[in-house]
Amino acid sequence: MLYFSKLRILFITIFSLLFVLIASSNLFNIDDNFFNKKINLGLDLQGGSYLLLEIDNDPVIEQKLQNLTTSIRNYFKDKDIKIYNIKIIDQDIFFNVSDQYKQAVIDVFKDESSELNPYYPRFKSHQLNIEDTELNFKVNFSKQGLIALKTSSQDQAIEIVRRRIDEIGTNEPNILKRGNNRILVELPGLDDPMRIKSLLGKTANLTFRFVTKDENDTFGVEKLKYENGIDESTVSKRIIISGDNLLDAQPRMDNQNNETVVSFSLDRVGAKRFGKATSKGIGKQLAIVLDNKIISAPVIRDTIASGSGQITGGFTFQTATDLALLLRSGALPAPLNIIEERTVGPDLGQDSINAGMIALAIGFLLVIIFMFVKYKIFGLITNVTLIINLFILIGILTLFEATLTLPGIAGIILTVGMAVDANVLIFERIKEELKSENNNILAFDSGYTKSRTAIIDANITTLLAAIILFFMGSGPVKGFSVTLGVGIFTTLFSVYFIARLFTSFYVTKNRNKEKLI
């Protein structure tokens, strides 16, 4: 029946007013944590930067193979199995073994419970391909092993990228996976991405190593250039401490030398290693190496046992701040390359907002005129309900602080059309019922009841499409599916609760009127 209890009327009224108030917080500043929420504008509306990053996994694979080479050598040494000529060529490990140990080596690599597994909890022995060609063994990662490695590298890289961007304070960044070796970064409101690109382009692999003149150093040596790209020094490959031992890093002003430095503090293990190294290395140069470039190489004057120190290098305050940020956020597992970059200016974003609002206003106005001309007072009820429906939809998006994109505005416009379509179905059904029913209340109630199946079926099919778009789509497509999906629920609520309540008031008051619609 068209009858509404007082409790139901109260619920509809409070629910509608609540979301109207929440939606209004986008226009007014309300000093309340609950109502002080706003819809965030997406990249296409607010302007900003779009970066597509690709992870270079080759260094990660090389490092894993280097570690695996060491473990293979040590494992077979402990088992008194002689292998020799072990080396890495093109991401493959090759080694030779005498004939008497050939089968033993094959059994080790093909046994999933092999003792080599504890060294590689992520890459079990069954994820390694082993080939045996005339006593020359080749070991490499299988397809599954490479996928696992790349996925792990991508997950770690996303976390580091998020930390670096969050440290800068960028508003509502959008960081998403693309495949298993790409990362999409959207930065609304940022029209100059140079600093972000500089921060994301650095691996931030920090090591402390001694400068040496001994070419026959036990740990091996390598020549590294300074940041100026001209000077170079020979440094030991032995790592005293790495970025993993850092607890904190902050830019500071050294008043004594009148220069900007980066002060750092180490964890307990790092402090112990650093203190031991500096006590034995007094008078030596300690190279501070970032991404295979020497930042500075100060001479050790005294033992540093406090677990803290300073990095100098002729920094400006901005470069010192960025270096401290990189060190705090941690090193990327692999280098990131920018393969696509787009910048949307705020003017273009504002133009998109204006175009979307104009389209919404024109469509809404045409719908209002059509409904009023076609259905008179019931058209007016529909129009009022449409406005409330829009407020509820925007209120729900505001409550969850959703990001609105241009396709999202299209979803709102489509919601208006669907709401009107539902009302048209109901009113046309009521007209059919009035031909055979003299009681206006029964005719209207029957019209709402008998049109329900068609309306719900139509909205369910649309909702299924929205769900598929949400899970299969990305970026703006998801924005469209979200507004469309929420709009379906607000439409059904507005049609069967708000519009029906207004209709009930009018029909009950004019039940004896000869022609209501």
Image: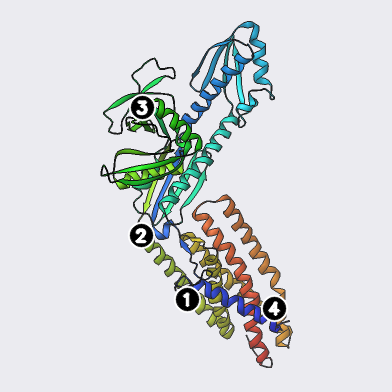
Asked whether the residues under the numbered discs 1 and 2 touch, taking CB atoms below 8 Å apart as contact, a structural biologist would say no
Closer mark to the observer between disc 2 and disc 4: 2
Identified by mark 2, the residue type is: Pro
Can you say which quadrant of the picture contains the N terminus? bottom right
Image location of residue 97, percent across then percent down: 59, 9
Tell me the mark number nearer the camera, choosing from 3 and 1. Answer: 3
Furthest residue to the bottom? 512
**Looking at the image, is mark 3 or mark 2 earlier in the sequence?**
3
| Mark sitting earlier along the chain (4/1) | 1
What number is the disc on residue 346?
Answer: 2
In the image, what residue type sits under mark 4?
Gly
In the rendered structure, find residue 447 and report the number of the disc placed on it.
Answer: 4
Query: Is 155 left, or right, of 190 in this rendering?
Result: right
Q: Which residue is mark 1?
A: 365
Local SS, label 4: helix
Identify which amino acid the numbered label 3 is placed on: Ile
Relative to 224, say whether 200 is above or below: below
Q: Position of residue 429 (x, y in %)?
A: 67, 77
State if disc 1 and disc 4 touch (CB < 8 Å).
no
Disc 4 to disc 1, C-alpha distance: 27 Å
Q: Is residue 260 above or below residue 470?
A: above
Dot 3: few (<14), some (14–19), or many (≥20) neighbours within 10 Å? some
- Of marks 3 and 1, which one's residue comes earlier in the chain? 3
Q: How many neighbours does mark 1 have within 10 angstroms: few (below 14), some (14-19), or many (20 or more)? A: few
Reading the image, the residue beneath label 3 is 282
Other residues around mark 4 within 10 Å, as few (<14) / some (14–19) / many (≥20): many
Element carrying mark 2: helix
Estimate the x, y position of residue 298 in percent, counting from the top left: 32, 32
Given contact means CB atoms under 8 Å apart, are the residues at marks 3 and 1 in contact?
Answer: no
